[in-house]
Amino acid sequence: MNMATTTVMAPPAPKRIEDMNLSIVMMRDIVLKTMFRKNTNTVSSLARAVCLPVPVTQELIDLSRGQGLIEAMGTMGAAGEISSEMPYQLTDSGKARALDALAQSEYFGPMPVPLEVYREQVERQSIRNIQITRDQLTGAMGHLILPDDLIGNLGPAVSSGRSILMYGPPGNGKSSISNGIRDAMGDRIYVPRAIEYSGQVITVYDPIVHSKAEEDAENPTALRRTARFDRRYVMCKRPTVITGGELSLSMLDLVYNPTARTYQAPLQLKSTGGIFIVDDLGRQAEPPQKLVNRWIVPLEESKDILALQSGEKFEVPFDTLVIFSTNFHPNEIFDRAALRRIFFKIKIDGPSQENFLKIFALVARKKGMQLDEPSLVHLMKRKYPTIDNLYANYQPVFLIDQMIAVCDFEGLPYRMTPELVDRAWANMFVKDEHIVK
């Protein structure tokens, strides 16, 4: 399957209450709570609020009317009035029921998607269905100067949708490469606003994590557009969750809001269908081995296990490309069993001298620093031998920014000189010495 032509099958919109696979009481109560909280009084406005087609919303209103919880406020307007609709309101019994339901759960608005139904959509848009070509991956990383064989190693790893461990010295672009992998995935998937399990609501869609696709912007005048797909989902770019030293095991559990009595999906569930990047592995408070142990079942069985407040455990899909990035050698932080479960291990070394000079020239041109051959010779022949000619991708940016800062302060033109090189170099490393306290 070629990513450029892949079209993810959209979740079909429900046509009847029976298609919802949710408890009638739950659906009715969400309608009542939404009317109470949002003060909606027409079928179309309520349908938009609960993200359901108008016919299904009308069924729920009729059901509630039959139970004496909703009543019509009058008759529709004269024939020919486009915007005329029958207005509805909660009865006293309906208000009492809404308040009672809110006391049990503050959730209202978009109707949740049952977990079992969501599983089917995850399979339709699985990240393992993506097949990225060399050209696509190279295009997404065109701004990076990489070793010739790196794309060849990354491509199969990304296309497999399996876990990747990138390791090597700091400052050599592991984070930039991870972001390039993210950018190479150009298609879109459908993210549920909320899912339901055992009567509990778990919110999934997060505007901080998920980038809503432009085509999903709703036009209030185009009422028929709402039938294109189930509006309980949001069409988004494949999500990317990036964590660093702040990652803890608790962030991989359901987050319960005791006030609202609802749950928020953990990071890995929000990244379903996309990428989860664990940057700077080894800098977290939790030992790397312990973090990876938490991922063993998800990585091997494509499912994760979460727990409700009651202690009840249940399975959710795990369809995520996990990328671990570390400055440590894998043997220092993992045992063999953990390494076996990480499917691809790719070392990211520092650049060769040739690639280092390409990066240096590229950064200098971008930042307006005029290069000078004697200064470059000074840098390469006098400075780098003092650190055994160990080049890193971050160094050109660091050195040039340092030189620019000096030029700005001294009122000098942006032109490289041996003196500027020396001043910049002095800030790149800290000399080992004992400080008397």
Image (spheres, helix red, strand yellow):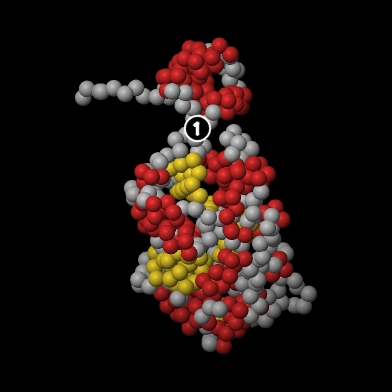
- Residue 415 image offset from top left, x and y in percent: 57, 15
Residue 112 appears in the picture as rendered: no
Residue at position x 47%, y 61% from top?
Answer: 300
Where is 252 relative to 280, above or below?
below
Figure quadrant of residue 261:
bottom left
Residue at image mark 1: 350
In front of the other: 96 or 225:
225
In this image, 211 relative to 163: left or right? right
Residue 222, image x and y in percent? 72, 64
Q: Is residue 209 left or right of residue 432?
A: right
Choose between 277 and 60: the one closer to the eye. Answer: 277
Residue at 64% across, 41% down: 138
Q: Secondary structure at mark 1?
A: loop
Residue 434 shows in this picture: yes
Q: Quadrant of residue 88?
A: bottom right
Which residue, as the protein is rendered here, is positioned at the far bottom? 66
Task: Report x, y in % for residue 433.
Answer: 29, 22
Q: Position of residue 319 (x, y in %)?
A: 53, 61
How packed mark 1 is, by other alpha carbons closer than 10 Å (few <14, some 14-19, many 20 or more), is: many
Residue under the point 67% across and 54% down: 3
Answer with the quarter of the image where residue 127 lies. Answer: bottom right
Residue at 68 percent across and 63 percent down: it is 220
- Left or right of 206, for residue 338: left
Disc 1 marks a residue whose amino acid type is: Gly
Quarter of the figure with the C terminus: top left
